[in-house]
Amino acid sequence: SVAVVLFTADLRLHDHPPLRAALRAADEVVPLFVLDPGIHAAGFDAPNRRAFLADCLHDLDASLRRRAGRLVVRSGPVVRVVREVVAECGAGKVHLAAGVTAYAHHREERLREGLGDSGVALHAHETVTTVVAPGAVTPAGSDHFAVFTPYFRRWSRESLREPLGAPRTVRVPDGVRGGPLPDRAEVPGTSPGLPDGGETAGRDRFSLWSRAGMSAYEDRHDDLAGDATSRLSPYLHFGALSAVELVHRARRRGGPGAEAFVRQLCWRDFHHQVLAARPKASAEDYRTRHDHWRGEKDAAADISAWREGRTGYPVVDAAMRQLRHEGWMHNRARLLVASFLTKTLYVDWRIGARHFLDLLVDGDIVNNQLNWQWVAGTGTDTRPHRVLNPVVQGRRFDPDGAYVHRWVPELRDVDGKRVHEPWRLPEDQRAALDYPAPLIDLADGLDRFRHARGRD
Ligand code: FAD
C-alpha cells in the first residue's frame, strides 16, 4: 500500500508524526511538497522566506535520499496536485500536519472535500507545529486564553508526547515524479546576511546553542549586542525543528536558561491559540479597538524613515537596518521599533506588521500579527499603555553602544555612552555626522499618543 505525506510548515524528518504514521501503515510513502500559487496570492512568500524555504526543501530531499527516498516537489494548486499524486500512486491515505492558521485550516477543508469522492482519507496530525494543540487547553468559560501567565501555568502542566526519531528508510514508489527543487540562488531581493535554512542547519544550531548559550539565556536574552538568543525562529517557522522536541531537550538540560527558553516557546503556542480562536485578529484589533491611527497617507515620511532606519533614534535605526540586512531582528529590538512606530509615531500597527512580513525570514502570520498587537496595545498586553522610550531602552540594553556601532556606521566614532542621544553632542561634532536629527520629539509623540487614546 501507498500513503502520501503532504509536507507544509513541517520540513523535517525528526519528530514528524504524519511521516511516522504513514510509514507504519504503508509499504511505500510519497513525501510531497507543493509549491502552491495560493501562498503567493495570500502575500506570504517574501524573498527571504522563499530563499530559506528552498534550503529547507534541498535539505529535506538530501535527508530522504540518504534513506533511500526523495522529496517529490510539484507546482500548482494544492488540491489539484494532491489529487493527481494520489491517483498516480494509488494512495489510500494522505497525512499532513493539522493546520494552526486560518489559511491552513481552509487548505485542510479543501483537501478533505477534494479527496472526498475518491475514498482517500485525510489524516491531520496534531502537535506537529505547536507543543500543545491550539484549543487543547482553555480557561473556564472561554475558547482560548487571552492572558499569557495563566496560559503558561496551564500549558506547563500538560504532558507532552515523546519526540520521534527520524525514520531509517523511506521507500518512495518509482513512478511518481517531481519537478525541480527551487533554488535559493535564483530568488532575487534577499537580504545579504540571511542564514542557511534546513533541518540539518537548524539541528546544528540548536545543539551548539544549547551547549554554549542556553545557560546564559535568562540573563542575556535582552542584550542587543550580545545576540545571545537562539536564532531558531526561522527553523521553527518552517518546521525544520520540532517545538515539542526542543521543549524535551531543554527540560532535560534544565536550569534557569532552559526554563526561560521553554517559556518563550510557550509564547509561540499562546499566540497560536489566540489566533486559532480569533482568526480575524491577523488583521483586526483583537481586544481594544483604536480608530485614530495614522496611515500611509498621513504619515508617509515618518513611515519611510522608520522603514529605512533614519529616524534619528540610533537604536531604532540600528534595528531596522539589521532587519533589512539579515531578515531577522532581535526580540528586544522588535519590541522597541514596534512601540516607536505605533505609540510614538502613532502609525497603524498593520503597516509595521506588513513591513516585517516583507523582510523577516521567520515572518509568521501568527507571531508577527499578535506580537504587533501586543505592542500596539490592541492585543493581549495587560499594560496596553506602556510606551518604550528608545533612549532609555538603548542605554539599558545596549549600554556600550556596540549594537548601534554595528549597524549605524555614521555613529561608529561616537562614544558608546553618548551614542543614544547624538543630538546632545557638541555642535561641531554633531554637525560633522551624516546622521539625521530626531524625526519627532519624544514628548510630542507621547502627547499625541495620550490625546489619540483619549479620543478612542
Ligand atoms: P529566542 O529568544 O531564542 O526564543 C526561542 C523561540 O521562542 C523563538 O525562536 C520563537 O519561536 C519563540 N518566541 C520567542 N519570543 C516569542 C514571542 N514574543 N512570540 C512568539 N514566539 C516567540 N516571531 C516569529 O517567529 N515570527 C514573527 O514574525 C515575529 N514577529 C514579531 C513581531 C514583533 C513586533 C515582536 C515584538 C516579536 C515578533 N516575534 C516573531 C517574536 C520574537 O521576537 C521572535 O520569535 C524572536 O526574536 C526570534 O529570535 P530567537 O529565535 O533568537 O528567539
Image (spheres, helix red, strand yellow):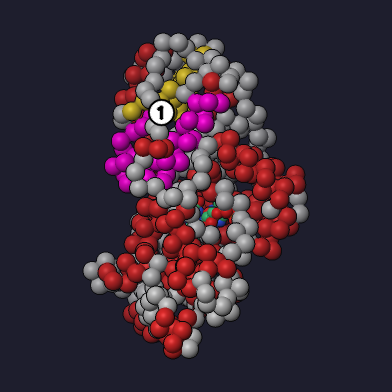
- Name which residue lies at 48% across and 30% down: 58
Percent position of residue 157, x then y: 68, 49
Residue at 36% across / 32% down in the picture? Answer: 35
Magenta region:
34-63
- Reply yes or no: does residue 36 show up in magenta: yes
Residue 442 in the image, given as x and y percentages of width and height:
43, 82
Does the image show residue 278?
Answer: no
Q: Is residue 419 above or below residue 151?
A: below
Q: Quadrant of the C terminus?
A: bottom left
Task: Examine the image and state in which quarter residue 267 appears.
Answer: bottom right
Does the image show residue 223? yes
Q: Which residue is mark 1?
A: 181
Few, some or many residues within 10 Å of mark 1 (<14, 14–19, 20+): some
Residue 313 vertical position relative to residue 230 in the rendered view, above or below: below
* In magenta stretch: residue 95: no
The three-letter code of the residue at mark 1 reads Leu
